[in-house]
Image: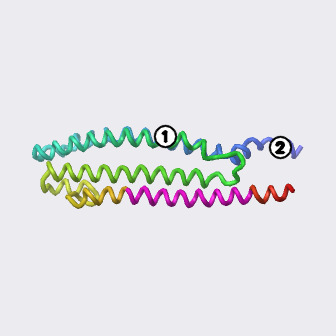
Amino acid sequence: MDDKLLSFLDPVWRYIDNGSFFREPFRWLYIAIAALNLLFPFVVIFLSVEGGIFKYMPGGTIFAFVLVFILLLALGAMSFLLWMNRQKKLKEMLHEKNEFVAIPMVSHFIQTLGEWMGFYIGILGCVASLLFMLFGGGDSVINSLLPLGTGIVMVIVYPIMGFLIVVSARLLAELYRALASIANNTKRISSHIDDK
């Protein structure tokens, strides 16, 4: 009787052990983040127009803002495609024989998050700095919109920051993945030796 009661939960334990328990929620998280990236530019545009930021700005600055909004739309689409592409690759990461399944999922998320943030900061910071420098003049409102301000130096600094974020996230993700790979291979070798 006790065996039947305990075996009733075996499918649940197998679902957790084979990685589906981790993979599916991460896939849905990726899809949700992808959808939010499509909505984000529209929210920014709506809040900017509703907030009346254009009332007291000169024409050149308004033109720069319009170009930045177009850039935000392009980055939103790029980010959507990145997250959707990465969620498709989650299934490839887990194998039935892997003992450690959470580490690959988390490392993949760290890598994707780093790529997303790096591209966003690098591209948006560089292009927006350039546009505001060319069309916005020395408006103090513009300088407060980007985290490090705008200017000719920031046209170079933002892409470097974006690159460093991508590389750092990739390094951290690969360290986690290497740890999981070593652990999985060690487990396979020890079980292979035990079988002999």
- Indicate the position of residue 168 as horizontal and vertical percent values: 45, 60
- Start and end of the magenta stretch? 163-187
Q: Which amino acid, mark 2?
A: Leu
Instruction: Give the quadrant of the N terminus.
Output: top right
Choose mark 2 or mark 1, whichever is in front.
Answer: 1
Report which residue position mark 2 lands on: 5
Badge 2 density bin: few <14, some 14–19, many ≥20, Cα 10 Å: few
Q: Which amino acid, mark 1?
A: Asn
Specify which label sits upstream in the sequence, 2 or 1.
2
Residue ID at (60%, 43%): 92
- Indicate the position of residue 47 as horizontal and vertical percent values: 27, 42
Asked whether, in this view, residue 22 is left or right of residue 38, the answer is: right
Verify whether residue 174 appears in magenta.
yes
Question: Relative to 69, does residue 119 appear above or below in the rendering?
Answer: below
Tag 2–tag 1 contact (CB < 8 Å): no
C-alpha distance separating marks 2 and 1: 42 Å
- Indicate the position of residue 132 as horizontal and vertical percent values: 18, 51
Asked whether, in this view, residue 105 is left or right of residue 42, the answer is: right
Of 185 and 39, nearer the camera is: 185
Verify whether residue 158 appears in magenta.
no
Report which quarter residue 100 is drawn in: bottom right
Of 37 and 171, nearer the camera is: 171
Report which residue position mark 1 lands on: 85
